[in-house]
Amino acid sequence: MRDSDNPLPRPGAGFADALLLWFARAQRPLPWRRDCGAYRVWISEIMLQQTQMDRGVAYFNKWMRRFPDIRSVAAAGEDAILAAWEGLGYYSRARNLHRAAKVIMEKHGGVFPPAFADIRALPGVGEYTAGAISCIAFNNPYPAVDANVLRVFSRVCDIADSVALAETRRRVTELVRAVTPEGRARGFCQALMELGALVCGKVPRCGECPVRDFCEALRRGTAGERPVKGAAAEYRRLVTAAVVVERAGRVFLRRRPPGGMWAGLWEFPGGEVDSGENPEDALVRHVAGLAGAGEPERIGTVRHGYTVWRVTLHGFLLRLDGGAAFDPPGGGVWVKKNALGEYAFPSGHAKLLRLLGWK
Ligand code: SF4
């Protein structure tokens, strides 16, 4: 029988108590902990996927001022939702959140549903997020295994299998289910995540760890080798160019098609720069009508990441006379410069606007 066929050994009695005691003392005062209503927990969980904590807190507070409840999210237009999300990336999260708010209004009378199956059925809510909302908002004992929790248990149980394997996650999930103390799911779930974030991080600080007496990896001297990971992601590089065209206080924008990268966001015309090509030539190749319209000036070069992509974007500005024609095939809209804040851009294009001081 393979090791991975066996359930993981449960940490000894006292593990949950030690962890909860520490959490009561050491937890960070995060805004969704002051009031852990389901709407707030849901928004925080969706925002914190792929987002660092400091940034997540700032966006959370801003979001709550703009959309204080589920009703206000459901009633908003998609552009307002995407604009509030701008800079967080992974915009399908915002679109799903918008759809889910409408489902809650229509199917659950505007009240966030407490049942796990109903939470899991909401657009954009996967197994982990449904577990986290169930635990934190409703104190129901559903396991919520994120990267922090996986790392903690890979060490507490000294797991030699890769944490990238679905089987490892399944075993850890089963263990978390088994060790969650009755009636204390809310605290336990957050305490595990907090331990992974504050103490049992990439470099474990075992000397100050509240569960060091229960940690197999510490006992065997393997903490530095855990978690075992799969192969690192391979990044792909992309070089692009875009031109901000301004005419009489308005800026030319295009909307990206639905589906695919940055679906539905707004951007400036441009495209990929081929290897060996200069960005000015690439712009002329991609933006019909640019060649005769004038000489774009360089704004700067920005870099940004999206999933496995590492994108370099060369930005240009073309100021046209009030009467000059610019009407490239594919269409677009002319938007007042002072209304640009209402439009959501992929982060590279938003950076160009910041370089110009327009957003
Ligand atoms: Fe992590 Fe060290 Fe604590 Fe073990 S003792 S859980 S490795 S911080």
Image (spheres, grey):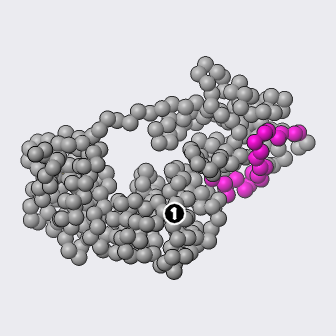
Q: Is residue 331 left or right of residue 152?
A: right
Task: Tell me where residue 211 sits by quadrant.
Answer: bottom left
- Is 117 located above or below residue 339 in the figure? below
Is 325 or 331 nearer to us in this picture?
A: 331
Q: Is residue 181 magenta?
A: no
- Expressed as whole percent of the image width and height from the top left, the position of residue 244 reads 72, 40
- Is 268 located above or below residue 274 in the figure? below
Is 289 or 358 nearer to us in this picture?
A: 289
What residue lies at 29% left-to-right and 67% top-to-bottom? 142
Visible residue check, residue 30: no
Residue farthest toward the bottom in the current orientation of the protein: 109
Task: Tell me where residue 342 sits by quadrant.
Answer: bottom right
What residue lies at 59% left-to-right and 61% top-to-bottom? 81
- Expressed as whole percent of the image width and height from the top left, the position of residue 240 reads 61, 32
Q: Secondary structure at mark 1?
A: helix
Task: Tell me where residue 302 sits by quadrant.
Answer: top right
Residue farthest toward the top in the current orientation of the protein: 276
Q: Is residue 140 left or right of residue 253?
A: left
Is 241 or 177 nearer to us in this picture?
A: 177
What residue lies at 51% left-to-right and 50% top-to-bottom? 90
- Residue on which the image places disc 1: 97
Please provide the residue range marked out in magenta: 324-344
Ligand 1 lies under 8 Å from the Cβ of mark 1: no
- Expressed as whole percent of the image width and height from the top left, the position of residue 212 reads 13, 54
Q: Identify which amino acid the numbered label 1 is placed on.
A: Leu
Q: Quadrant of the N terminus?
A: top left
What residue lies at 50% left-to-right and 35% top-to-bottom? 310
Q: Is residue 333 magenta?
A: yes
Visible residue check, residue 71: yes
- Expressed as whole percent of the image width and height from the top left, the position of residue 328 reads 79, 38
Residue farthest toward the front in the current orientation of the protein: 1
Q: Residues within 10 Å of mark 1 (few under 14, many from 20)?
A: many
